[in-house]
Amino acid sequence: MNRQSRGWARRPDGRTWIDLGTIVVALIWYSVAWPTLHVTHVVPAAAQPFIAALAAFPVLLVRINPALGWAISAGSALLIALAIPHQPNNDLPFQVVHVLCLLVLLFGVALRAQGQIIAVAWAATALLFATTMPGEGEAFGNAAWGWPIALAALVLFGLLIRWLVLSRRQLVRQEEANEVERARRAILEEKARIARDLHDVVAHHMSLVVVQAQTAPYRIEGVTPAARAEFESIGATAREALNEIRGMLGVLRSDGLLPEHAPQPKAADVLGLFEGAQRAGVDLTWTVEGALDTIAETTGLALYRIAQESLSNASRHAPGASVHVRIVHGADLVLRVGNEPGTTAARPAGNGGHGIAGMRARAMAVGGEVAAGPRDDGGFDVEARLPLALANTGAPTPPEDVASEG
C-alpha cells in the first residue's frame, strides 16, 4: 500500500463516507430482497439472486451516475411488473426495496442531472407508479394523482438541496476571489508606497543635481568653457536618470503591469548608451560590425546590460582611462570592452562587487558566456559571446561596418 492509499484509509473524507454508506445500504437491501422475493413473486430459485440484484444494486450508481442507475432500476421494475407473476397475497408489482431504490435514484437525479433529464425521470417514474401500483376506482385515482405529487415533492426537495450546495460553493469561490483581490490590493499599495519613497528620496535629489548643474555657471564666477561643458554633461546625465526613474515609477504605480512588461532596451540602443557615456566624460571609442536592429530582443537586452555594466565598472575602477568597445555581428554576437589603466584613484565600490557575476548571469540567460579579467599592462577586458538570433525571418542582411570615435 503506497503513502497516498494509506492516507486515504486514515483520513476518509465526506465523499468516502457516502460511498461506504451506499455500499452498506445496497448490501442490506440485497440481503432483504433475495430471501423475501419468493414471498412476493413467482420466481425460480436460480433467478432469485439476479432479480434481487436488479432491485437493490442500482443504488450503487447514485453518486457516480444517478441517471444511469435510475434507468436500470426503472426499466427492471417495469420488466418485473409485466413479466413476473405475483403471489396471490401480494398486490405490489415489485418489491418495496425496488421502490426505495427508485426513490433514492430519482433524488440523486434531482441533485446531479440536467433539467431535461430530471423532468423525464420524474414523469417516467410517476407514470410507472401510477399505472402499476394497485388500485381501482377511487383508489386508482389516488395512485394516479398521489404518486406524481409525492415524487414532485421529492424532486423539489432535491433541487433545493442542490441549490443550497451550489450557493455554498459559489460563496466559497467568491471568498477565494476576494482573498486574491485583497492580496492584489496589498501588493498595489506596497508598490505605491515604494513609488512614493522613490520619488521623495531619489527623484528629489536628482532634480536638485540637475538644477545645480544648470545654474552653476551662473552662480560661480570664472567658470571655464571646459567646466561649463562638464556641468552640462552632469545635467544631461542626471536628466537621463530622472527619465528612467519616471519609467520605474510608472511601472510601480500601474495596475496589473509587471516590470518585465515595461519597454526594455534593444541592441540598437547601445549606441545611445555609448554617446551618453561620452557626454559624461568617458574617453570612449567604439566599433560596430553588423546591423544591430536585426538582433532578437532577449539577446539585445543582454548586450545592452552587459555593455552598460562594463562601462560602469571601467568608470568606477579606472577613472580617466580610455575605453575601447567592439561589437561583432557574425556567427555569434561578440562584445569586447577593454580599458587602459586608470589615470586617477579609483572610487570606492559600493555595490558589493556583483557586476561581473551579474553580467555572467545575463549572458547565461540567453545561452551565452562572459569572460572578464585584468591585463598584464594594468588594464581590464570583458568579452561576452551571445548566441545570435535574427528578429526577422527573411534573408540575413550583409554586415555593414559602422565606426565612430569620440
Image: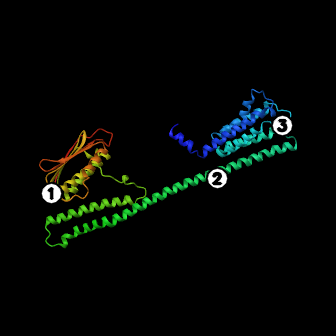
Q: Which residue is drawn at 75% across and 39% down?
A: 97
| Label of residue 320 in the image | 1
* Tag 3 residue: 91
**Against 313, is 137 above or below?**
above
Label 1: which secondary element: loop
| Label of residue 181 in the image | none
Residue type at mark 1: give it: Gly
- In the rendered image, residue 378, in percent from the top left (x then y), is placed at 13, 50
Q: Give whichever of 184, 225 is nearer the camera.
A: 184
Q: Give whichever of 87, 20 is nearer the camera.
A: 20
Label 3: which secondary element: loop
Residue type at mark 3: give it: Asp
Q: Residue at x 22, y 67 (%)?
A: 213
Residue type at mark 2: give it: Leu
- In the rendered image, residue 300, in percent from the top left (x then y), is placed at 29, 47
98 relative to 289 in the view: left or right: right
Label 2: which secondary element: helix
Callout in the foreground (2, 1): 2
Q: Which of marks 2 and 1 is nearer the N terminus?
A: 2
The residues tagged by marks 2 and 1 sit, at their Cα atoms, a distance apart of 77 Å
Q: Which residue is drawn at 64% across and 44% down?
A: 112
Mark 2 touching mark 1, by CB under 8 A?
A: no
327 relative to 127 in the view: left or right: left
Q: Earlier in the sequence, mark 2 or mark 3?
A: 3
Mark 2 touching mark 3, by CB under 8 A?
A: no
Local crowd at mark 3 within 10 Å, few (<14), some, or many (≥20)?
Answer: some
**Against 323, is 394 above or below?**
above
Q: Earlier in the sequence, mark 3 or mark 1?
A: 3
* Tag 2 residue: 164
**Against 105, is 275 above or below?**
below
